[in-house]
Amino acid sequence: MLRLLVLVLLLANAAFFAWSQGLLLAWGLGPTRQSEPQRVAQQVRPETVRVLSASDLRQAETVAAQAPRPPECLQTAALDATQVPQLRTVLDTWPAGSWTLDAVTEPARWIIYMGKYPGVEQVARKRAELRQLGITFEPPTNPELEPGLSLGSFPSEAAASGQLAALAEKGVRTARVVQERPEQKGQRLQLPAVDDNLRPRLDELKFALAGKPLRPCR
């Protein structure tokens, strides 16, 4: 009996050794591999990775916040002639070459419009419906059309009407084509390189711009 027990133990040990070394993989038996050498091969300079302490993280965030932002180009839409003299008075105190005023003609723009709505709750409800239909939207740039939604802007009424017909096939029922703005002639302010030195001075322009926003240059 003792001999039999010893023999069973020896066989069990031999079987475990064969299993642990993967000698039985041909029969579908073996330990689950814990290593993934392909991922190790894909690592890029793993020796540079280090764990940051809370103080290191705060210091890194401070350095990132203090890093200079790259310059950006900003511009307005066409400005009315009555706005330009006051704007020039402010801009004359800015560094030379930091701004330009150029005569421009902005063509009329037509949009597919939904609104006006009684309040923000109705706008939110309509936005949810449009998302379910997979239709993109944005606020109209004309404040007189708020609260409402624009489903796209177009250079002509015919182009907007054609897109409206396509949207109707997707389930849009209450939209219509409206002129968001007529043709505008005036002067456009452009700030070609607004850096960290000029950004604090943007507030100086707000009154002269009379609510017309500065947007990224196109």
Image: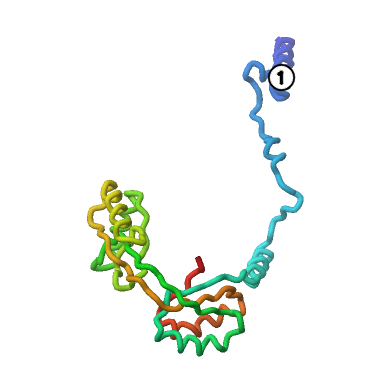
Name the residue: 64% across, 20% down. Answer: 29
Q: Amino acid at mark 1?
A: Leu
Q: Quadrant of residue 99?
A: bottom right
> Which residue is at a point 23% across and 57% down the rendered structure image?
174
Residue 167 lies, in percent from the top left, at 29, 50
Q: Residue at point 71% right, 15% down?
A: 11
Decide: is 29 above or below 62. above
The quadrant of the picture occupied by the N terminus is top right
Q: In the image shown, does 175 or 55 lie closer to the viewer?
A: 175
In the foreground, 94 or 187: 187
Frontmost residue, 156 versus 10: 156
Left or right: 137 as drawn, with respect to 24: left
Looking at the picture, does residue 33 appear above or below residue 186? Answer: above
Percent coordinates x, y for residue 97 in the rendering: 60, 80
Q: Based on the displayed image, in which of its 4 quarters is residue 42 positioned?
A: top right
Q: Circle 1 — which element?
A: loop
Give coordinates of residue 3: x percent, y percent.
Answer: 74, 10
Name the residue beneath numbered marker 1.
23
